Amino acid sequence: MNAPLKSPAAAPWHLQGNWAPVLDEIDVGPLVVRGHIPPQLHGDYVRAGMNPRSGQSQHWFAGNGMLHSVQLNDGQARYRNRFVRTPYYEGDMNMMSGMFDPAASPANTNIIRHAGRWLALEEAHWPWEVDRDLNTLGAHDFGGRLGGSMTAHPRVCPVTGELLFFGYQLAKPPFLTYYRADSAGNLVEAQAIELPNPVMMHDWNVTRNHVVFMDLPVVFDLKAAMRGEPPLAFRPEAGARLGVMKRNDAGGQVRWFEIDPCYVFHPVNAYEQGDTLVLHVCRQDQAMAGGFEEIYGGDRTLGRLWRWTIDLAAGTVREDQIDDAAADFPRIHDDLVGLPARWAYMASLNAQAPSLTLGQRLYKYDLATGARLTRDFGPNSHLGEPIFIPRDGASDEDDGWILALSHDESQDQSALVILNAQDFTGEPEAEILMPRRIPYGAHGNWMPR
Ligand SMILES: [Fe+2]
């Protein structure tokens, strides 16, 4: 099933085609729109991505962070992009030289808003604050209380407004630390968690009263790194476990549940149901199977929708595959994070491609039944993470819009697509044509005004 990998002589996949960086910073508008931008959408769609300033980088993860924003106002749109100017950018650092300075973040993975702050995130360093115009303001270490790194996938609890997150580190214990910030952004809890191995922990799960860590076997090996071998590798013999902890003041008490070795970059959502925790995740059989440099190792390294049901009374985990379509970058209605959400939205992945390739489809899943709706944009198009924006005053969970960046490789044209989430397979309400190609990237969010 493994697709052939590119020859070593070719440029690495993360510098080819629309993965290649763009180097200028521009501010353009109003943009050309096909259809009509819903006038209710007032705010900024902002997305982070890897964009090496030199045009070269050793690894996909190592590119300098660039933020792209599409500002919507009165049915019109403007585009702006800026590098995040951290010491990693200013010093043109690489993964090794930036490793030991917590401020030297590539800031290339996600952009969130909490307590009025816009934070550009990457998982091995501190967050970096930017303003609405994407100017870099400075590192944000929560007033000196954030000791080490912060994940790029914190969760804002829709009930309490808290920012829940973790940080992992590979070089020495504690390999994992849990953090909780109150709704005003004050860091009120920091708790070291014991892990047997230093592992790459990209994301996690949050419910109303618990968090669930994923100790999955992409293991850091210092000795291998010193021998010049890949520092991270998939080692199923290390085992895989889910760690359930109370959100507030658990004192590091984690209850661990064994599961089959696998990897999950992105969970969909999690919620409590009686004595069980129900987790939907994009699960892949392996990670880094093409080697650390390649990441992609064919079909077995692509995510698919699974459900893990943790029975806290029985002490068991049931693992069910829900669908066989390769998909990742899952999102739900953000007001239902940690609560029973019915609808999930994902980007398809191309399981036939020779390297990591976003697919031509977006999916809408009914998590209650496992049913999938498909919106196909045609073979030249590649769609990124679909985010959901609720309509003001909506009563239905899916009453709102899906925003996703697309890139048509035959025209070299990027666009921001706006779909009516309740007419998911219908024509987009708007396609906002970008004034330049926007390289494929990572995660983004809607910042309403
Ligand atoms: Fe991610």
Image (cartoon, grey):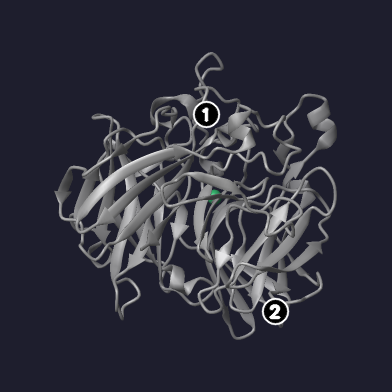
Picture coordinates of residue 96, whole percent (x, y): 72, 30
Quarter of the picture containing the C terminus is bottom left
Residue to which mark 1 is pinned: 52
* Residue 228, picture quadrant: top right
445 and 330: which is toward the camera: 445
Instruction: Report crowding for label 2: few under 14, some 14 to 19, many 20 or more residues within 10 A (C-alpha).
Output: some
Q: What amino acid is labelled 2 in the image? A: Leu
Q: What amino acid is labelled 1 in the image? A: Pro
**Image-based side of 356 in relation to 229, left or right:** left
Is label 2 or label 1 in front?
1
Vertical relation: 377 (above or below) 254: above
**Image-based side of 427 in relation to 44, left or right:** left
Picture coordinates of residue 153, whole percent (x, y): 57, 56
Residue 387's disc number: none
Vertical relation: 382 (above or below) 156: above
Give the Cα separation between the discs numbered 2 and 1: 45 Å
Going from N to C along the chain, the mark reached first, 2 or 1, is 1
**Image-based side of 270 in relation to 166, left or right:** left
Picture coordinates of residue 426, whole percent (x, y): 19, 58
Picture coordinates of residue 322, whole percent (x, y): 48, 63
Instruction: Report crowding for label 1: few under 14, some 14 to 19, many 20 or more residues within 10 A (C-alpha).
Output: many
Residue to which mark 2 is pinned: 312
Q: Which residue is found at the position 59% from the left and 78% from the top?
A: 208
Q: Which residue is found at the position 55% from the left and 37% from the top?
A: 85
4 and 162: which is toward the camera: 162
Give the secondary structure at mark 2: loop
**Image-based side of 283 in relation to 224, left or right:** left
Is residue 251 among what the camera can see? yes
